Amino acid sequence: MGTDVFNKVEKINSELFTLTYGALVTQLIKDYEDIEQVNIKLEQMGYNIGIRLIEEFLAKSNIGRCADFMETAEVIAKVGFKMFLGVTATVIDQDPDKREFHLILDDNPLIDFVELPEQYKHKLYYSNILCGVIRGALEMVQMKVKCTFMKCTLSDETSSDIKVVLEEVLSDMIPVGYD
Amino acid sequence: MNNNNNNNIYQQQIQALQQYKDIKHSIQSWITPKVLILSSPSVGKLFQKTNNSSLHEVFAQYVMEKKKANFKIGESSYDLQDFKVNFINSKSLDPQENPNLFKDIGNTVDSLSTDEYCNNFKLRTKQDIPYFQKICPEPTPWFDKYRHNFIRASHYLETETFAHPLACIIAVSSEDQNPIGMLVKMFDPAKPPQIFQQYNIDPNIPKIYILVHPETSHGESDKRLSEMKNTFGPTVSYILRVNTKEDYCGLHFDPSTAHLNPLTLIINDILQKHIPNYIERSMIDLSENIATNRKSFFSKMKVSFRIGNKKNEKEVEQDATQSNQVSIEQSMRKMADQYFLLQDYEQALSNYKSLVKEYNSDKSPNYFASVNEMIGICNFMLNKESESYLELAYNNYQKAGLNHCSVRVAFLHGELLKRKSNYKALSDLYKQTAEKDIDPFCSAVLWEQAGFYLMHSPWLLFRKACMRIVMAGDKYSEAGKRKHALRCYSFSYSVYEGRDWNFIDDHLHLSLVRYSFFQGHTSDAILFVNKLLEKNCQSFQKQNSIIREFLFISKSYTKDNYIGELPIPSILNDSIQVGLNDYSSEASKSIWRDMEDGFKKEAQIISKPQLQGFDLWRKDLFVEAEKERTAVVEELITVEVEIKNPLQIPLQFNRVHLVASFKDTTEGGTQMEESNMSPLDDQALEKMQAGETPFIVEPVDLLLGPSETKKLLFSIQPTRPGLLVIKGLGLCMCGVIWGKREFKLKQKRLNKTKAHRESVMYEPNLSLTFRVTSPMPRLEVQFLEFAQSMFHGELRQAKLLLKNCSNKMGLKNVRIRLTHPSMVCFGTSDQDASLLESLDSSVLLNISLKANEQVTIPFWVRAIQIGRHQLGCLVYYESEAGNSDLKYRLARCQTEFEVKPSIRVATFSQQSSSDLNAYILGIEVDNSMIGESTAFNLAQFSAISKFWKIQPLSYQDQVPNKSIVTIKSNQFTNLFFRICPNLETSPTQQQQQDKLSITNISFDPSLSMFDSSSFPVYNFLELEKLLINYQLSQQQQQQQLQQQNQPHHHTTSGSSLSLSPNSQQNYDHPNHLDLVLFWECNSNSGSSLNLLSGNRIGTLNFPNILFLPTHYSDSALSTPWGSWKSTTSPSGKIITLIDPNLKIQLPLRFQLHSDLDVNHSFQQNPLCIVPLKLQLMNCSFVHQLNLTVECLLPHENVFDHSSTTSQYFWTGSTKTTIELKPQEIVNLPLYVCFNQPGVYNINRFKLSVKLSESSKDIYSTVQHLITIKDT
Amino acid sequence: MSVLYTFLIIGKNDNPLYEIEFPSSSQKKESTYINQYILHSSLDIVEEHVWKSNNMYLKIIDKYNKYNISSYVTAGQIKLMLLHEKKDEDPIRSFFTEVHDIYLKYLLNPFYTFNTPITSPTFDARVRKLGAKYFF
């Protein structure tokens, strides 16, 4: 499923992509000098990407309405990531009442070559933009989620782990003023 | 004026230097006849007196204009225009003395040495070099002079004969007794001084005998002189009169008339008679000697070649040749040398050339070398090609290990290379030479030259150059020439500076520290020490010495031992934590923040905007700008900080204290800045104790082990209102020097506006800036007698201790906020305190405390929620005096307690069938505490309601027996009550709407009743209601969420749901009451905190128990037994299961009354008419009901039974319209008529109620059977 | 044992980016500071050679007494310098080239700013491995 969508979308040089993102993050750090701020900013950028990306996503991968949140999870992991990052994530420990799940990224093109300096470890969530993207995208389909990095391989942790919690289901109102 | 002088002097120096540039001059002054001067000790003493010179120096000083001299060698004759001699003493001949000799040479140029090549020039890149060469064409002016002196003084007795004296002056003082004997002894040709034999210097040189005669002495000089003349011959005997004072000894002549100088005569004789004679003579014997020996020499060679076996013989012969005074080579050499002396370079050259064949580089490299050298020099003098020879000479000197000779050659060769401007080769030559084991100063000079010549090389190899200059520096320091050393280091430092070559930097810094200190540039020294310590990649010992040096230097330099910013120790700035009374520490912030914000609002102090929903994502735009915090005079501010020792050696610091600056901002107060940046030495300390300083700090001593980190707590106490800024730490290092370390707080980078983003701007970090305000009362708060563990619902009394610690100020309007507002009620059982109207408001205690006053406030705790709890209490108070800076202050205290489950109660209610307006209430109590031995006794049961009261049903006598109301663990019991309207408070009397009716039912006569309507029970009930409403509203949001989660609801479901929470309609619904169940249990904890002594009691509240008007056709109400159940779950949360649509029922109840058995004789009257009473009631308290009662005619068969069923008829009015006021009961008379006996079910009537919009038809579904008997 | 090899990466501004000695010696001996001087000073020669030749590996460019200095200059004018006693071309050449590769990889790390000291432990580890591979 994910792969053929992946084949549909056009590609760019991965190194260019990675370096661009790297430059972005480091510039943010230069400008803010405050890792907490940087995390937030990244998340916001992601959000702004997400609310646009979802359109393309739905268009390219003609995926219908999900039965429940867990299906959403699978779609994100298998189709969404594949389509835009060329990798797939695995969904783990979903809680019984289907309100949260974890995405495990075993391969993340954003962090190729990246080596986090000691002082940033466990502070900076380098790929935090992903959280934003997920949040933004889901918000466009009336799911207000909280999306946070639990673990990050860059901080010498076993895996990259994104936690997604469903906070509320929105009624059909279009959020305005998000750029 | 003075300058001019200096300039002149400098000019003169330059002039003087010019002569040294010409290397030929150097050569000539080296290769020139030497005259040995031997003087008796007493003579030595004599001349000691005048600035301890010596006789030979006196001669040396003696300036001579160019002397002519002429020689006849064979047929050719030379007359030299300028002929001079070097006077030497025996010491300068002795090779042992060489090292000192070189030292002296080095010292000759000290006057020229500078400590920088040219000031404020920094060499960073290639491009700087041309500039440097422009502004500083001659960095090392002393070099030429040094070279000159070096060449001049250098000699190598073994191979060259230039050092061999050609004449000898022997001097005695006329004060010696028997001078003649001495003179003879001092130089005896038979056995000349040791050196002469060693290097077989010809002893038969002309000797000049001088009698030094001090005028003061009485010895008759002339007699002595004549004696001398007799013994030695008149031509060689002289007298030298000197006039001596006790301190001075000078030659006896008038300087203006130089020719009168007694020395002139002597020297002239030497130059014009003695030496020429000697040379002429020696040339002759030399040539003879050579002539004679040459044959034997060659024959010897032949022999040695032809007859190998005649070895011994040959050796013998050789011994012979050895033994006869001079070997042929030596004489040849000597001859050549003397030609050279006579400046007949051609001759000399030819001689050397022929001589060089005799040697070869393997057997005797030194001879070979020195001859080649001479050839080179000759060629040079004749301006012929000479390099090759010099190279040969150089290499062979190296081979022979004659480094100093090689240096000399290097100098010569270098000159040549320089002329050909082959700088690279030149530089390498010097480098190579410098690396040899030679006099350090010499090698230093060479290194330095090597360096600078590299800069001239086409590639401008400045890095290499600098390295060489550094090497020069090392050598200079080895030679103890600090000025030179410093110059070299500081010059090349600029190349490495700031390019972090760690080792190089260390090396340079270290040296720079030393030498700039020695040269008195102490500020630089300190600068470099700092750099050194910052880097610190040195070894343990090194650091030790550095520190020692550092301390020493800075001590000897700084005034009152204060040196400003210290390089060590390092402060971990992130670890800085400020402790201040009114502010919660970072750690516990989470607990207090909300309550603090609450108070802020109450005190109308703007706080950060409340964000929610979509705005959260840009919360960074809404962060509150930091304001400096407010401290209070005479209250401690504590600063916790971690300090690290970066070095590998222990460091000791004394009197470590906070350093701060203080600004007096009181109106009218001058804006003076005070600060104790100066060391906290004793008098500063006294001043502080005396309270003259605007703040008081607490010094501590500190010892930091190698790379140890310590966490320290410092405190500062402001003594005046103003602005206090904590700058850093002041400390006394190793008890020697004072310095400070500044705190560098992380500042927040500003990024809000465009300006911010474009430039780098920081928000000032004010966490160490304090607005010190005038004294304020300080309140300390503390829980007293607070139970650590309680049962669910238990009521306990506790106390809150408020203590005003200030001894001046009083405080007023104390307000309190709690983390668990619904658990606490302030006040005692008799007088209750102000009651909360909403959970997020604060309790105002009308307390005001004078200075040092304290008060304990009793309060009630009721355990509502099971589990562990952190009860935090935030107390707000204001100063009685009032304070603009600090409107209010906050005190904090907290305690922890546990709530264990107790009994659990479920209630249920249902309408009573016996009475129109009565209901049945059941409660089910069970002791859920499994395993726990505690038994709970139900003490009392109270109902609180506007209109209702309850009566016990389940027992007849006025108390149930104990067994029912005592509940052991795992038991449960049911009690039933009847709810009926409380007439005196029926709502019809409007005036007493709000009066509550309270029914208390005691289960234990021994206990007096609790008044449920009063404090604290009632208050807790209220609180609990608040809590429940809160929770309900929460629940509802949850529920909505739940319902929306089904994705297919996405579009619509949200809006369709009724959002009204139960709580609302519970209120407007009249039919509810609040129940309070009192339990007590006698647990062994004999605490006296109870309502009544002994037992622990608690209440369980069930607010809003609903019981509803029923209607037969009402689906919602036709639920079975146990409807409207509500339970108190252990979690303390009350679950009320009520259908949200309840408010659309009919508050209508009706009942049919009549006598059920009727005897009637149908004979007398065929029709039996029975009166009925239809009782209609409107249970509502608000709405009035309009309804029509219609009796259905029999033939209109509602329920189509079999036709057999006997009929009855209505009589009288069969349709009535009634209007029912709220709570009104109407009895509607009806008449039914039977025509035969039987059992009749009277239910054929219809009630149609007019509702606002529609009307609702109700058919009776309840049987009302009447039995008719015929009599 | 004496230090046989000293390896330095030197930035555009003559600033050392990375230094290591084979076999790595924990205690600092005085020689090390001389080594730095030597390597620094032979930068001059490197510059000369850079003009002359157009391949990155410049063989042995300089001598200091018993030491030889080999150099390798990247396109970005980053100079890899090796101070060694033994004259064995090939391992040195390949050592240089592989270190160059690692360096290029490391350059892609957004947190590494060009021409600043390389502190990354992983980089260090890799270089050590290479050193062990080629020099012992």
Image (cartoon, grey):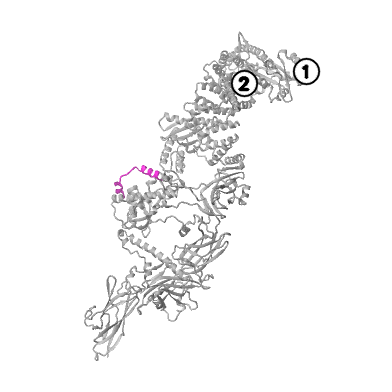
Give, as a three-letter code, the residue at label 2. Answer: Glu
Magenta span of residues: A2-25
Q: Residue at x 49, y 49 (%)?
A: B765
Q: Residue B931's x, y, as percent?
A: 47, 69
Q: Position of residue B134 (x, y in %)?
A: 50, 27
The residue singled out by tag 2 in the image is: B158
- The quadrant the N terminus of chain B occupies is top right
Q: What's the chain of the residue with tag 2?
A: B
Can you tell which quarter of the image residue B412 is in?
top right
Q: In the rendered structure, which amino acid carries the disc numbered 1? A: Glu
Give the quarter of the figure containing the C terminus of chain B.
Answer: bottom left
Label 2: state its secondary structure.
loop
Q: Residue B220: which numbered mark, if any?
A: 1
From the viewer's perspective, is B1107 left or right of B1089? left
The mark lying in front, picked from 2 and 1, is: 1
Callout 2 environment at 10 Å: few (<14), some (14 to 19), or many (20+)? Answer: some
Main SS, magenta residues: helix
